[in-house]
Image (spheres, rainbow, N blue to C red):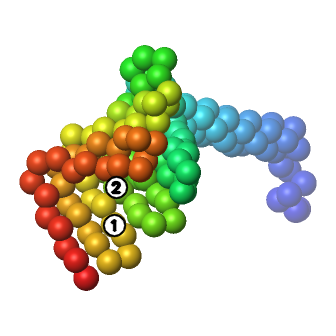
Amino acid sequence: MNFFLHINKNLIFGLAILIIIFFLIIIFFKKLNQIDFQSSNIESKLPNVDITEPKFAINNDKEKIYISAKEGNFINKDEILLKKNVRFNSNNFSIETEKVIFNRNKQTAQSNTESIFKTKNTTISSDGFDIYDKGNKIIFYGNSIVILK
C-alpha cells in the first residue's frame, strides 16, 4: 500500500502552522531589535546638542561669509558655540576649525582652536582667530604660519 495514504493530514497541517508561526516570531524579534538599535544609535550620536548641522551667514558690503558646522549649542540668546568641522566659506576665502563662538547679533566669530585659512594664493595656519566688523577684518592668534604661493 502507499505510504502517503497512512500519513495523518492534520498532523502535517499542524506542523506547517507551527513552522510558519516560528518564522514569524523570528522576523518580529529581528525588526524589534533593529528599531531599538536605530533609536539608541541616534541618541548616542547627538548627546547634549541644541542644533544639528547649523548654518549661518555674515553679511557685509562686499560678500557673504557662510558658516556651517556639525553641532551647535546656545551659550545665550546671541552667542552660539559651533563645534566639529566648522567652516567659513566665501567667494574669496575659507577657514576651517573645530570650535567657534559665533555672535549672531554682532556678526562676529572667535576661535581658540587650530585654524586653517585658505585663499587662492595664501594659506595661514594659526592657533585661533577673531572675525569682526561684519567679516571685513580677521585677526589670527598664537603661532601662525603663512604660506604664500
In the figure, 6 relative to 50: above or below?
below
Q: Which residue is mark 2?
A: 96
The answer to whether one can see residue 40 in this image is no
Mark 2–mark 1 distance (CA, rounded to whole Å)? 9 Å
Closest to the observer, 65 or 20: 65
Direction from residue 16 to residue 27 in the image, left or right: left
Residue 148 picture quarter: bottom left
The quarter in which the N terminus is drawn is bottom right
Asked whether the beta carbons under mark 2 and mark 1 sit within 8 Å of each other, the answer is: yes
In the figure, 69 relative to 37: above or below?
below
In the figure, 4 relative to 112: above or below?
below
Q: Secondary structure at mark 1?
A: strand
Residue depicted at x 28% and y 72%: 122
Q: Secondary structure at mark 2?
A: strand
Q: Which residue sits furthest left?
A: 143
Percent x, y of residue 9:
88, 44
Percent x, y of residue 52:
51, 36
Percent x, y of residue 42:
50, 35
Q: Which callout, 2 or 1, points at the residue further toward the start of the chain? A: 2
Residue depicted at x 38% and y 76%: 120
Q: Amino acid at mark 2?
A: Glu
Q: Which residue is mark 1?
A: 118
Callout 1: 10 Å neighbours few (<14), some, many (20+)?
Answer: some
